[in-house]
């Protein structure tokens, strides 16, 4: 096994070359490189670099999407090979697109970036009823609840969920991070969310900030 | 009298810079019309829009409802319908999951399938109620996304480009060209305009847009011209969400895409955060046309979230800056971009009044000398009572 294998995997993730990434990962596993090393030294740096290039305006959305899809496929191969005690999480996040909203793209990228940053993410999917968010917060006791809305008309659900968290005595236990094409910092402030993620990379930065300051 | 929007002569004769809006869920909510009527019944849709149009005093209108849905819905894609919002494509279950699925698709019956009859009737009524003789369609890239989903289409473009070309060829030749022909015959419009939000930066790079959007937009224009209709697509919007990342070269590349797609220097500054971008690079871009004496049309958009979130002073400042930069030597229209349903009416009144005040022709040398106070207006419901509606 060439010492460059990990850097080749990293490059394949960065460039969204999923077939190549999966082949290289299989080779690395056959050469007894640990799944955790492949994740930490190749897969995560690959997607993080994609996020960096997006932030610099060098990558456009297609490159980020292909890199994120490659990350997901790679994790699909490697995650079952890792025992839970090997994984240290940076925090737990429950996330979903609110009722009436079936847009998947933005949330998929956000989930990928959060996972790459070390967060345990419970993805509730799309068109998630308000009560499901409340029940899952109660069940998983996450650090952050992520709410995505991509249409102005579905934004209403985010406001209602925050009110329901308060009514159920859960609001003080969880930070609320919102995002989506129809949202803004002004809107987040207006409805009482704790933070707004402009895009996936920004959402990770905001999640980090929220968890760091959670006890304050 | 037919008002031909392709020439926009009637707009040019207004005493001020014209202001228009895209306001679908907004008008529906303000007028308290159920979504399942508004997005299905062309007469209810048009009359609702007309009332809200009159209430605010817009000069022209973009009356096309859920533009991105009609063709894809008629082809058989799954949509999600709501009681209080426009229908939306369910991107979790794309119609073309596998390349072989494309073979199953055929040209829709534009007079019967899905809500295409509604779309056609909206176009007809637009002419009758607003004097705007222009049709509407979903641009080729956006329709391909609607059929295939964005991640799969991107994957096709990169990893199986021949299929991506097959898909786009189907979209243009089997859907959009015949749709343009039907619009010409049934609606008697000389022109139809395609909305193509997916074909914008950063959804695609300028290189992607030139490779994948422009050739199909040009193909559509050429083929539709054979039927006597001008079918143009608005691709290439610049939509960088981080103003500090504004890149003048990329933005100018977007304007190249727009010009090549439209066949004329008709520029659309609608979707992005133009209230925060510098405008001088746009003037630099249009200088070559102005020097040649070619008329440059600019539609400058007030960003939807700015309209909703305000403050009014920022909305007014944005409009004043657009007028100051473009109105003296470009044919400028101000566009209130897809007004969010929960936008305070005061924000919209202020925007319209600002355009009519600062945009009064001839444009003053110094707009700072013009006094402006946002109007205090009755509510929509009170206005309806006064009008006996």
Image (spheres, coloured by chain):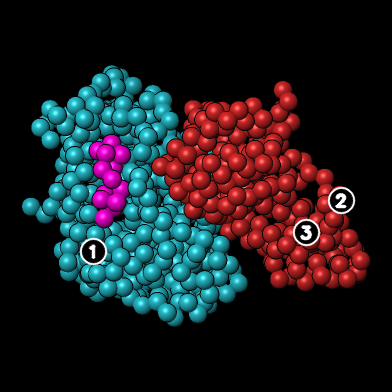
Q: Which residue is mark 2?
A: A86
- Residue name at image x 77 percent, y 71 percent: A23
Front residue of A197/B205: it is A197
Q: Colour of chain B?
A: cyan
Q: Which mark is residue B117?
A: 1
Q: Callout 1 environment at 10 Å: few (<14), some (14 to 19), or many (20+)?
A: some
Mark 2 to mark 1: distance in Å? 59 Å
Magenta span of residues: B27-40
Among the chains pictured, the one given red colouring is A
- Residue name at image x 28 percent, y 62 percent: B115
Does any portion of residue B195 appear in the rendered image? Answer: no
The reply to whether callout 3 and callout 1 are in contact (CB within 8 Å) is: no
Mark 2 to mark 3: distance in Å? 11 Å
Q: Callout 3 environment at 10 Å: few (<14), some (14 to 19), or many (20+)?
A: some
Q: Position of residue B96 (x, y in %)?
A: 48, 71
Report whether mark 2 lies on the same chain as mark 3: yes
Q: Nearer the viewer, mark 2 or mark 1?
A: 2
Q: Position of residue A104 (x, y in %)?
A: 54, 54
Residue B56 against residue B39 in the figure, above or below: above
Which quarter of the picture shows residue A169? top right
Residue A78 lies within the magenta run: no
Report whether mark 3 lies on the same chain as mark 1: no
Q: Which residue is mark 3?
A: A79
Front residue of B145/A175: it is A175
Q: Nearer the viewer, mark 3 or mark 1?
A: 3
Residue B31 lies within the magenta run: yes
Q: Chain of mark 2?
A: A
Q: Quadrant of the C terminus of chain B?
A: top left
């Amino acid at each position: 096994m060439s010492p460059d294998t990990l850097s080749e995997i990293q490059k394949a993730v960065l460039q969204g070359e999923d077939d190549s990434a999966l082949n290289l990962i299989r080779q690395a596993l056959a050469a007894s490189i640990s799944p955790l090393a492949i994740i930490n030294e190749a897969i995560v740096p690959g997607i993080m670099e994609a996020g960096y290039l997006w932030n610099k305006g060098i990558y456009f959305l297609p490159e980020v999407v292909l890199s994120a899809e490659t990350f997901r496929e790679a994790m699909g191969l490697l995650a079952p090979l890792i025992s839970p005690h090997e994984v240290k999480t940076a925090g737990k996040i429950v996330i979903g697109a609110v009722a009436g909203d079936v847009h998947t793209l933005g949330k998929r990228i956000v989930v990928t970036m959060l996972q790459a940053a070390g967060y345990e993410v419970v993805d509730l999917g799309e068109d998630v009823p308000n009560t499901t968010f409340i029940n899952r917060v109660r069940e998983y006791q996450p650090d952050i609840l992520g709410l995505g809305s991509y249409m102005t008309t579905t934004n209403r659900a985010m406001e209602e969920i925050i009110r329901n968290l308060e009514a159920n005595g859960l609001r003080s236990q969880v930070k609320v991070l919102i995002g989506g094409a129809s949202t803004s910092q002004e809107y987040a402030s207006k409805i009482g969310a704790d933070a707004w993620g402009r895009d996936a990379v920004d959402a990770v930065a905001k999640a980090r900030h929220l968890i760091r300051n959670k006890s304050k | 009298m037919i008002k031909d929007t392709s020439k926009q002569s009637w707009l040019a004769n207004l005493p001020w810079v014209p202001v228009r809006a895209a306001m679908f869920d907004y008008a529906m909510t303000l007028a308290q019309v159920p979504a399942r009527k508004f997005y299905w019944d062309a007469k209810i849709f048009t009359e609702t829009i007309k009332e809200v149009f009159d209430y605010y005093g817009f000069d022209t209108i973009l009356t096309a409802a859920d533009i991105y849905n009609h063709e894809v819905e008629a082809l058989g894609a799954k949509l999600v319908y709501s009681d209080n919002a426009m229908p939306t494509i369910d991107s979790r279950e794309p119609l073309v999951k596998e390349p072989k699925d494309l073979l199953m698709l055929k040209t829709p019956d534009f007079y019967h399938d899905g809500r295409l009859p509604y779309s056609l009737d909206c176009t007809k009524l637009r002419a009758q109620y607003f004097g705007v003789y222009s049709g509407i369609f979903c641009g080729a890239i956006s329709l391909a996304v609607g059929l295939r989903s964005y991640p799969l289409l991107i994957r096709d473009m990169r990893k199986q480009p021949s299929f991506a070309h097959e898909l786009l060829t189907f979209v243009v030749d089997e859907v959009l060209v015949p749709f343009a022909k039907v619009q010409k015959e049934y609606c008697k419009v000389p022109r139809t305009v395609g909305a193509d939000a997916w074909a914008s930066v950063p959804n695609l790079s300028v290189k992607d847009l030139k490779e994948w959007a422009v050739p199909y937009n040009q193909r559509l224009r050429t083929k539709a011209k054979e039927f006597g209709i001008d079918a143009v697509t608005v691709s290439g919007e610049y939509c960088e969400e981080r103003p500090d990342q504004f890149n003048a070269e990329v933005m100018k590349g977007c304007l190249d895409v727009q010009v090549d797609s439209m066949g004329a220097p008709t520029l659309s500054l609608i979707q992005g955060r133009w209230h925060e971008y510098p405008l001088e690079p746009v003037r630099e871009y249009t200088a070559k046309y102005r020097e040649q004496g070619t008329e440059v049309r600019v539609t400058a958009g007030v960003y939807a979230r700015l309209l909703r979130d305000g403050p009014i002073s920022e909305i007014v400042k944005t409009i004043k800056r657009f007028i100051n930069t473009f109105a003296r030597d470009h044919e400028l229209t101000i566009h209130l971009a897809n007004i969010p349903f929960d936008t305070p009416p005061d924000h919209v009144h202020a925007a319209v009044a600002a355009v009519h005040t600062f945009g009064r022709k001839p444009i003053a040398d110094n707009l700072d000398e013009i006094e402006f106070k946002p109007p205090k207006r009755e509510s929509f419901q009170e206005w309806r009572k006064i009008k006996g509606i």
